[in-house]
Amino acid sequence: MSQKRPNVSFEFFPTKTDAGHEKLLNTARELAGYNPDFFSCTYGAGGSTRDRTLNTVMQLDSEVKVPTAPHLSCVGDSKAELVELLNLYKSKGINRIVALRGDLPSGMGMSSGELRHANDLVELIRAETGDHFHIEVAAYPEMHPQARNFEDDIANFVRKAKAGADSAITQYFFNADCYFYFVERVRKLGVDIPVIPGIMPITNYSKLARFSDACGAELPRWVRKQLEAYGDDTQSIQRFGEEMITGLCERLIEGGAPGLHFYTLNQAAPSLAVWKNLQG
């Protein structure tokens, strides 16, 4: 591609085993060689992976030497717990946060925790730490699965952005038009922060279909049918996935997307295959 190199970032999830953690670090070191703008690391529902997230973030930031943004969700945590964690990250030199409402852990009602929405968390971060953190928020071009309707979801995003967010990362999607429409809508409502597309490489059909159904990301019928036709032919699935996602990314960048955020699932190869194609 002849255009200026877009920003790129990669997301990880904290692992439950030492072996998994070592694999994560090796993946991160490989991706670090491509000069990403930052890494991010997820955070379990109700803070269930807090210590693992903290440890992973610190290692990625200090040892792998790529600025790393912890995910921070407010559901199930008190303000005091959140402020303590913010101050800890600040003291460790972390200066980027992905601020989320978070998934509701099983059995928890919406009343769990003192902050109910992501915009409340953004406001808390700004009130407690000023401009120290670059705050990312989530965007849902195809609507959050728990939103009442699309208009409500757009309004929720605008609230988060205007509460003090610096940029946004979207849920993954496979239809570029939904991204461009979302950006156009929020721009008309006065939101001018960068909205970075979230990109999910395709490597396994059954897992992708299950995950997409759960999180409200539409897997187009033609893609489902093509992936179904490959059956257990992993090589064909990966080849098709790489080609399709490369094409999606090219269209996004050409259409003005400010960067790409890859959901790596702690693997380097699928994201790197797409990224290298874009540099070709």
Image (cartoon, grey):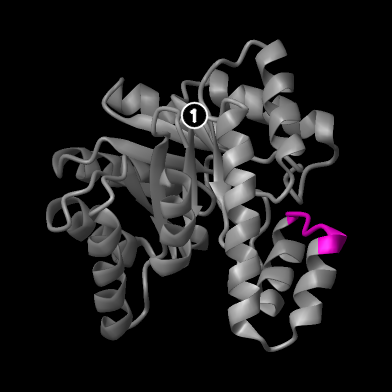
Q: Which residue is mark 1?
A: 258
Asked whether, in this view, residue 199 is left or right of residue 36, the answer is right
What amino acid does circle 1 point to? Pro
Up-down relation of residue 86 to residue 42 (above or below): above
**Which element type, helix, strand or loop, lies under badge 1?**
loop
Q: Which residues are magenta?
A: 216-222
Residue 78: tell me if it is visible.
Answer: no
Up-down relation of residue 76 to residue 138 (above or below): below
- Name the magenta segment's main secondary structure: loop
Which residue occupies 55% across, 37% down? 118
Which residue occupies 66% across, 57% down? 244
Which residue occupies 69% across, 75% down? 205
Up-down relation of residue 150 to residue 74 (above or below): above
Q: Residues within 10 Å of mark 1 (few under 14, many from 20)?
A: some
Residue closest to the far bottom: 232
Indicate the quadrant where residue 57 lies. Answer: bottom left
State yes or no: residue 97 in magenta.
no
